[in-house]
Image (tube, rainbow, N blue to C red):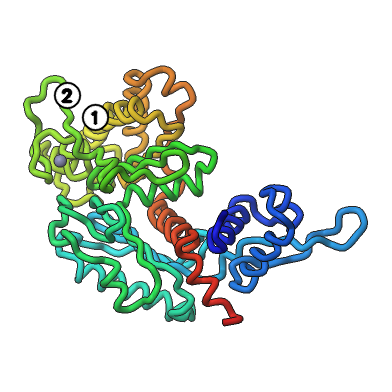
Amino acid sequence: MATFDEGISETLSLLRRKGGMTRAEIVAETGLSRSAVNLRIDALLEARLVSGSARETVAKGRPAEVFSFNSERGKLLAADVGATKFRAGLCNLGGDVESEIELPSDVSAGPEILLTSIMKCFETFLAETGTNDDEILGIGLSLPAPVKRGSGMSVNPPIMPLWNRFDVPAWFGERFASPVFLEKDANAMAYGEARFSHPEADDLLLVKIGTGIGSGLIREGRLYRGADGAAGDLGHIPMTLPGDDEGPLCKCGNHGCLEARAGGWAILRDLREAGADVDSQDDLIAALAAGDPSAVQLARRAGQAIGTAVATAVNLLNPRVVVLAGHLVAAGGDHLLPAIRERVYSRSLPLATADLTIVASSLHPREGLVGLAHLVSDGILEPAQIGRLVERGPSD
Ligand SMILES: [Zn+2]
């Protein structure tokens, strides 16, 4: 027997998935009694998590009231942090980004400096939109680093050692009372793509190809983090190509990782070694956009290495959709994607590739923010958390 909070969370989840429904439709869909549905709807109405409106009458009789998820019940604050930039946003509960800004970031400088500039963005959103603190129902942050499952901390992050075990929820907790969710960047992106662009695919792999390389996995409709939260670390799998020795040194201290061959920082290193005058990811993006032959050749080579790793992942996990995201896909997708596709289709099992789709992200550059908004929204509306919102209803 479901508890009351489980019941209202389940009914709300149904309305979020299906759109507006009448009481009779909810009864028919769930098999619940009319009185149980009434109790749940009344609680959700009182908490303003759903709103009711009359549907046009079918034939004769009174118009039936249709109940829909009220995505304007509150706001969420989110920040998607990359190695060189972060994007902060104010979103509604439906994952719509209502205000946003992108600024340079230096994750290696440590958490205090970066979180302070993110907080400044959040304060600006609140001031500019006239949003009160009590309307903020949740906060989400994603990092280009492994996040220990359920801890709100990154553990031994290779490119940002000063963040090791820094308590992100506690830091935001000094300013906001709402729950704080910390997630690995590729996980947030995978969640956003799965919820927004590919809701029909229960099994999805997202590969982020930016300064570094990472991946996020949706398995049977849920984010798969592994036993500790380290699942999906595609960038640091060992990768040897024909003609190579142990391979270039990686930022994690090992040699020959995928990222040390094909990540944005590795391509930049190789482009510089080839004599090009480039020193940032923006320079690399500009070189790719201009069709610089060395940059294009390096991107194709990176695509082959990434494709080999993705083929392994496809053999192991059998996703329905592989989404490629990150600034190198946006800038150099024409060179990366064919190489990745060719490698995956020639190296993976026919059964795994027959219905496999490999696409570039359709949410770029917002895949991280949209994913965080959905993660936070789902997090605060799950049975264990929804009581906070129902208790805060106007009748209290
Ligand atoms: Zn590595």
Residue 204, image quadrant = top left
Most foreground residue, 325 or 37: 37
Q: What residue type is labelled 1?
A: Ala
Query: At 16% from the left edge and 36% from the top edge, which residue is drawn?
Result: 257
**Dot 1 crowding, Cα within 10 Å, few <14, some 14–19, many 20+:** many
**Residue 241 to residue 378: above or below:** above
Most foreground residue, 184 or 323: 184
Q: In this view, does 238 lie to the left or right of 60?
A: left
Q: Is mark 1 within 8 Å of ligand 1?
A: no
Query: At 12% from the left edge and 45% from the top edge, which residue is drawn?
Result: 252
Q: SS class of the residue under badge 1?
A: helix
Image location (x, y in percent) of residue 92: 51, 65
Q: Do the residues labelled 1 and 2 touch (CB within 8 Å)?
A: yes
- Residue 252 visible to the viewer: yes
Location of ligand 1 given as a quarter of the image: top left
Per the model, the C-alpha gap separating discs 1 and 2 is 8 Å
Image location (x, y in percent) of residue 143: 27, 56
Residue 241, image quadrant = top left
Q: SS class of the residue under badge 2?
A: loop
Image location (x, y in percent) of residue 7: 58, 58
Query: At 25% from the left edge and 42% from the top edge, which residue is drawn?
Result: 213
Q: Is residue 277 left or right of residue 35?
A: left
Most foreground residue, 13 or 210: 13
Residue 356, image quadrant = top left
Q: Residue 305 bears which disc, if any?
A: 1
Q: Which amino acid does label 2 sit on?
A: Leu
- Residue 289 visible to the viewer: no
**Dot 2 crowding, Cα within 10 Å, few <14, some 14–19, many 20+:** few
Q: Residue 389 bears which disc, if any?
A: none
Q: Tell me the quadrant of the picture where the N terminus can be found.
A: bottom right
Q: Tell me the quadrant of the picture where the C terminus can be found.
A: bottom right
Name the residue that disc number 2 marks: 241
